[in-house]
């Protein structure tokens, strides 16, 4: 499975890459919303992990752009945020995210979410 991680923090990218690659999946990365849209259009990932607080267009605005794009609208997006406040989950889901995780994300929680979407991708591709 190809996973796009939209994140501007080096340590977070390194951690998530280790988890994804240990599961046998491939990770591509973008640091901004605009870069993520261009990369997604080019590579067509099976899943997007979207940091909410990225430079420029934030993760929720970027998610809305994914949902408006005819070739990207169906890609599942999981929002990741370190600044969890009341109502954040609901805002993420309202913006078009399929899931929500609060940082710091634990290895087992991240693995569980990725496996959930990996199973859905296998069913869809059959």
Image (spheres, rainbow, N blue to C red):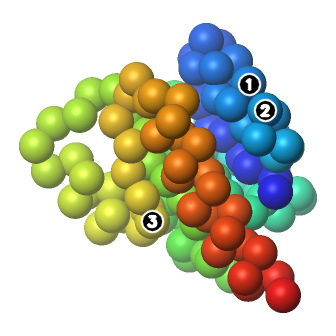
The answer to whether any part of residue 95 appears in the image is: yes
Q: Which residue is mark 1?
A: 18
**Mark 2 and 1 residues: CB-CB less than 8 Å, in contact?**
yes
Depth order, front residue of 114/8: 114
Q: Nearer the viewer, mark 1 or mark 3?
A: 1
Residue 69 appears in the picture as rendered: no
Q: CA distance from mark 2 to mark 1?
A: 6 Å
- The residue tagged with tag 3: helix, strand or loop? loop
Task: Single out the mark in the foreground, 2 or 1.
Answer: 2
Image quadrant assignment for residue 8: top right
Circle 3 or circle 2, nearest the eye: 2
Per the rendering, the mark at residue 63 is none
Q: Secondary structure at mark 1?
A: helix
Dividing the picture into quadrants, the one containing residue 105 is top left
Q: Residue at x 63, y 56 (%)?
A: 115
Residue 23, position as x, y percentages in the image: 77, 41
- Mark number for residue 22? 2
Residue 46 sits above or below residue 110 on the image: below
Q: CA distance from mark 1 to mark 3?
A: 23 Å
User: How many marks do you count on the picture?
Assistant: 3
- Farthest right residue in view: 42
Query: How many neighbours does mark 3 have within 10 angstroms: few (below 14), some (14-19), or many (20 or more)?
Result: some
Q: Earlier in the sequence, mark 3 or mark 2?
A: 2
Image coords of residue 59 (percent x, y): 47, 45
Image spot of residue 14 (x, y percent) = 70, 18
- Which residue is pictured at 74% across the width and 49% down the height? 3
Label annotation for residue 98: 3
User: Residue at (78%, 32%) from the top-left corner?
Assistant: 22
Q: Position of residue 94 (x, y in %)?
A: 30, 67
Q: Is residue 69 left or right of residue 29?
A: left
Quadrant location, the N terminus: bottom right
Determine the residue positioned at 65% across, 74% down.
120
């Amino acid at each position: 499975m190809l996973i796009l991680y939209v994140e501007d923090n080096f340590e977070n990218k390194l951690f998530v890459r280790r988890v994804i690659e240990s599961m046998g999946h491939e990770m591509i990365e973008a640091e901004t919303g605009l870069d993520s849209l261009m990369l997604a259009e080019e590579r067509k990932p099976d899943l997007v992990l979207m940091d909410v607080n990225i430079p420029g267009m934030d993760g929720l605005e970027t998610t809305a752009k994914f949902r408006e794009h005819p070739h990207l609208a169906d890609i599942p997006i999981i929002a990741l945020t370190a600044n969890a406040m009341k109502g954040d989950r609901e805002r993420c889901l309202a913006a078009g995210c399929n899931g929500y995780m609060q940082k710091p994300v634990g290895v087992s929680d991240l693995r569980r979410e990725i496996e959930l979407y990996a199973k859905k991708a296998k069913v869809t591709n059959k």
